[in-house]
Amino acid sequence: MQRLSSSLLIFSLMLVGLANTAFCEDYRDKSGFSFTHPTGWLPINGSLKSELIDGGITDTAKDYLKKQSFDFEKIKVLLIRNGQDDFLENVNVVVIDSKLPATQEFADLIVKILPQQYKQMGMKVDNFKSKIQTFGSNKGVIVDQRMNPSETVPNTLKQRQFYMASQNEDKSYIITYTATPETFRDHVKTYEEILKSFAD
């Protein structure tokens, strides 16, 4: 019995060790925010994009970056899974210069406004759901949505966005996780851990 208890303790410590090493990369943006992310996910901003394409990333990730035209004036950082699959899950951070309230009223307003905005952009987005949620010390509004094939988006994608006001400054963050419907659950925990570690 004592040997079994010792084995279980060792196994538990191994799991804790794995959990701690999984999220061992820190990203700090020049605009002031930071978060922790797992190894194998690459943070990319305007200054890092060309450097990464020439560096040690997968061919799939290189092709993805070359084909996609990300506006790094709006997107402060794009965190992309460095894999070989047809679609690479990613998280991006946008900063806006106003405080967004973490209220149900605002959550309801978002799902009314977003469909109109996406339609004007030529995108077919539906299945909107919103709620108030807290990750660590960060409270905000979670919005789920499905992006259907269109001229702008060739494949069906699933997104989860977190609208969070800065705790220290007069600004807010929109942190978006994008995946295929088939792989969304595979990496949503990674997204949630990033939200827990997010600070400014």
Image (cartoon, rainbow, N blue to C red):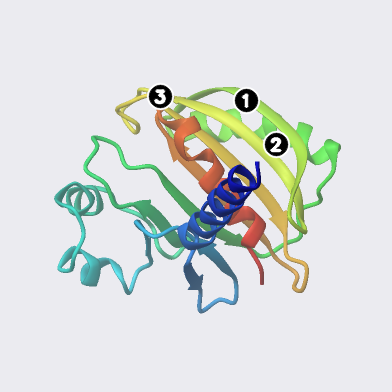
Identify the mark nearer the N-term, 1 or 2.
Answer: 2
Q: How many neighbours does mark 3 have within 10 angstroms: few (below 14), some (14-19), or many (20 or more)?
A: few
Identify the mark nearer the N-term, 3 or 2.
Answer: 2
Q: Which residue is mark 2?
A: 110
Are the two marked residues, 1 and 2, in contact with CB atoms closer than 8 angstroms?
yes
Q: Is residue 55 left or right of residue 157?
A: left
Q: Which residue is mark 1?
A: 128
Residue type, numbered disc 3: Glu
Q: How many neighbours does mark 1 have within 10 angstroms: few (below 14), some (14-19), or many (20 or more)?
A: some
Residue type, numbered disc 2: Ile
Image coordinates of residue 73 in percent, x first then y, are 44, 65
Q: How many neighbours does mark 2 have within 10 angstroms: few (below 14), some (14-19), or many (20 or more)?
A: some
Q: Nearer the viewer, mark 3 or mark 1?
A: 3
Identify the mark nearer the N-term, 3 or 1.
Answer: 1
Instruction: Kindly report the distance in space between the C-alpha atoms of the residues bearing marks 3 and 2.
Output: 25 Å
Residue type, numbered disc 1: Phe
